[in-house]
Image (spheres, coloured by chain):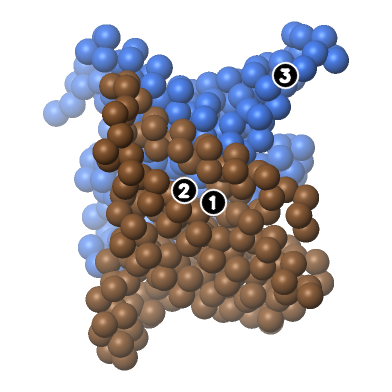
Chain colours: A brown, B blue
Amino acid sequence: MEYVIILIGAVFVNNIVLSQFLGICPFLGVSNKVSTSWGMSGAVLFVMTIATTVTYLLHQYVLVPMGLDYLRTITFILVIAALVQMVEIILKKVSPPLYQALGVFLPLITTNCAVLGVAILALGMEDASLLKAVFFAFSSSIGFALALIVFASIREYLELADIPKGMKGVPINLLVAGLLSLAFLGFAGLV
Amino acid sequence: MANTLDHKQNFLKGIIKENPVFVMLLGMCPTLGVTSSAFNGLGMGVATLFVLLMSNIVVSLIKTQVPNKVRIPAFIIIIASFVTIVEMVLEAFIPFLYEQLGIFIPLIVVNCLILGRAESFASKNNLLASIVDALGMGVGFVIALTALGAAREILGNGSIFEFKFVSEDASTFILFILPPGAFIALAYLAVVFNKMTQKTA
């Protein structure tokens, strides 16, 4: 039951993109086609889950016992950057089709604040265990995927819409994101 | 070599022509995440300005020492060190702001604006030009965040910098301090900014 609450909380109530504002860059940047947004979502799901596992263990068994808590930001960003490289190399060797699908998105993920943000948020959960932290990261990336894919689908329709001149491009996308966020606000209080 | 006129243009481009928020759409996460009041926007802007300035200075000083292949990780470590300093200083001296900004302080590390300037400007230019560039971009960022924070605070709370100018029981657009308001307010600010810059151009 606890895990169901984490899942619903991370996907709908505290969606990382629409209510926590993490990962806005890829959200606005790679959402012009539905197919690319699937690729990006897959890459984020993959990296976010692995990164949180590693950073959680590192924090729990290395940084905290040694009293190096203040180095959290530096170590986490390095671990994430190294991890993304490693995932890229392993995928290329082990599963070329998956690499083909996710390849271009992997380097972009290093500077995706959602990955670092979720790794830090997972440490702050109440009575967190490794399993809970990893499940939280997994649920958050599902939330990211949901927001990104819905947004990309709407943007494909916008291509054909007749939009006032001043609103074209960035402003109309931000407005759509705002309305989506408003819709997700309706889930508040669900958990 | 660069003269004073160049420096002036270099400074101004960050504020108007290449404004990081309204034009280049860099650093959107903190822009949307912390601007529920003008004070938070200003605080985040100044913290980012400091990190941007220091990282531009260091990157421009060591640019010839760092091998090309490892430059990005090196830049990230430099940025992360300054972010850690900011984090500790805020926690010690301005705990109120530290609470308010929360997770967005460590996330200054992944603000694409800072890495972007380190990579595309400071690693190619001399110290003075890099400082001017960081100040211009940083001030542009501060202005954008403060403007967005002020707009949201005025509409959502009827106050500016905590100074309330409507009566206590007046109803305000609470929507604007909630998450959707961030997107909507930024959308309209971007329209206004585009209109203004087109006129002067």
Q: Which residue has dot 3 on it?
A: B172
Front-most of A31 and B14? A31
Marks 2 and 1: in contact by CB < 8 Å?
Answer: yes
Marks 3 and 1: in contact by CB < 8 Å?
Answer: no
What type is the residue that disc 2 sits on? Answer: Ile
Discs 1 and 3 share one subunit = no
Viewer-side label of 3, 2: 3
Please state the horizontal and vertical placement of residue A31, each as a whole percent of the image: 36, 51
Secondary structure of the residue carrying numbered label 2? helix
Residue positioned 22% across, 13% down in the render? B201
> Which label's residue is closer to the chain start, 1 or 2?
1
Residue positioned 36% across, 34% down in the render? A170
Q: Is residue A139 above or below residue B30?
A: below
Is residue B75 left or right of B83 when viewed as pictured? left
Q: Which residue has dot 1 on it?
A: A17
Q: For the view shown, which residue lies furthest in the right direction?
A: B169
What type is the residue that disc 1 sits on? Answer: Val
Question: Residue B7: which quarter of the image?
Answer: top left
Please state the horizontal and vertical placement of residue B81, each as a whole percent of the image: 52, 55
Residue positioned 64% across, 19% down in the render? B155
Q: For the view shown, which residue lies furthest in the bottom direction?
A: A94
Q: Which residue has dot 2 on it?
A: A24
Is residue A162 left or right of B192 when viewed as pictured? left
Q: Chain of mark 2?
A: A
